[in-house]
């Protein structure tokens, strides 16, 4: 039995769209071609305003209450937008803090199953996008060093005018969620099928 755990922030949660239109749901539907329900289980563990710091803090509890003996956990991790947001004059987390948290999450996930990390998506603020690009490069290196997959959807989303679909400058609408799901699904099929 495979159990998929999608960890992330409010973008993973699907804020501003119906659950059926979230990229999580669209990705889960695609994965069901290979991993049917039952016995496979899918969990959306996105949470509003969660940076890598909050995801790390809740990771073990979220996993342990949902794990089943004999199951094969597969973690899909997407974080970084909250890390790089400026709620004051500085980003919520420094690049170093984000890197440490991300590396710790990856290590925890690897000790329990398979992990596939996905880059954060672009936002409407180009200054933040520059911080996101720097964080993505760091995340990609961490995954490379730890031997796990990293799906960088950021440049493709930027080129596909993903930003015009952001309802509030951060959260995608239906079209943006479809774009995320299409790019993720294409990569996940290569990695998992």
Image (tube, rainbow, N blue to C red):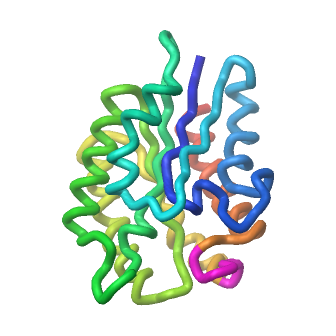
Residue 178 coordinates in the image, percent (x, y): 73, 61
- Residue 81 lies left or right of residue 100; in this view the side is right
Q: Residue furthest top?
A: 70
**Residue 124 at x, y percent in the picture:** 55, 85
Picture quarter with the C terminus? top right
Q: Where are the magenta residues, as a range? A: 164-170
The residue positioned 22% from the left and 63% from the top of the image is 97
**Residue placed most toward the observer, 182 or 21:** 21
Q: Nearer the viewer, residue 104 or 50?
A: 50
Quadrant in the picture for the N terminus: top right
In the image, taking residue 90 as reference, residue 85 lies left or right, namely: right
> What is the magenta segment's predominant secondary structure?
loop
Residue 168 sits inside the magenta stretch? yes
Relative to 141, does residue 7 appear above or below in the rendering?
above
Residue 28 lies left or right of residue 72; in this view the side is: right
Residue occupying image coordinates x 61% and y 55%: 13
Residue under the point 68% across and 36% down: 31
**Residue 75 location in percent, x, y?**
48, 38
Q: Quadrant of residue 61?
A: top left
Q: Is residue 68 magenta?
A: no
User: Where 179 falls versus 107 (above or below)?
Assistant: below
**Who's the residue at 55% across and 51% down the image?**
46
The answer to whether residue 3 is left or right of residue 16 is left
Where, by quadrant of the figure, is residue 44 drawn? top right
Residue 149: name its quadrant: top left
Q: Count all numbered tags in the image, as a single digit.
A: 0
């Amino acid at each position: 039995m495979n159990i998929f755990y999608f960890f992330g922030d409010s973008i993973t949660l699907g804020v501003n769209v119906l659950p059926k239109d979230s990229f999580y749901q669209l990705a889960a539907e695609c994965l069901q071609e290979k991993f049917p329900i039952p016995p496979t289980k899918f969990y959306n563990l996105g949470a509003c305003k969660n940076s890598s710091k909050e995801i790390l803090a809740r990771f073990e509890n979220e996993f342990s209450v949902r794990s089943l003996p004999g199951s094969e956990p597969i973690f899909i991790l997407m974080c970084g937008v909250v890390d790089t947001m400026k709620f004051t004059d500085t980003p919520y987390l420094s690049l170093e803090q984000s890197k440490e948290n991300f590396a710790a999450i990856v290590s925890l996930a690897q000790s329990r199953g398979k992990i596939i990390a996905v880059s954060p998506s672009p936002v409407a603020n180009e200054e933040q996008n520059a911080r996101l690009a720097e964080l993505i490069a760091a995340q990609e290196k961490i995954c490379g060093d730890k031997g796990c997959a990293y799906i960088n959807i950021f440049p493709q989303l930027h080129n596909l005018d993903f930003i015009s679909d952001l309802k509030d400058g951060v959260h995608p609408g239906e079209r943006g969620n479809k774009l995320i799901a299409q790019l993720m699904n294409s990569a996940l099929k290569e990695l998992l099928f």
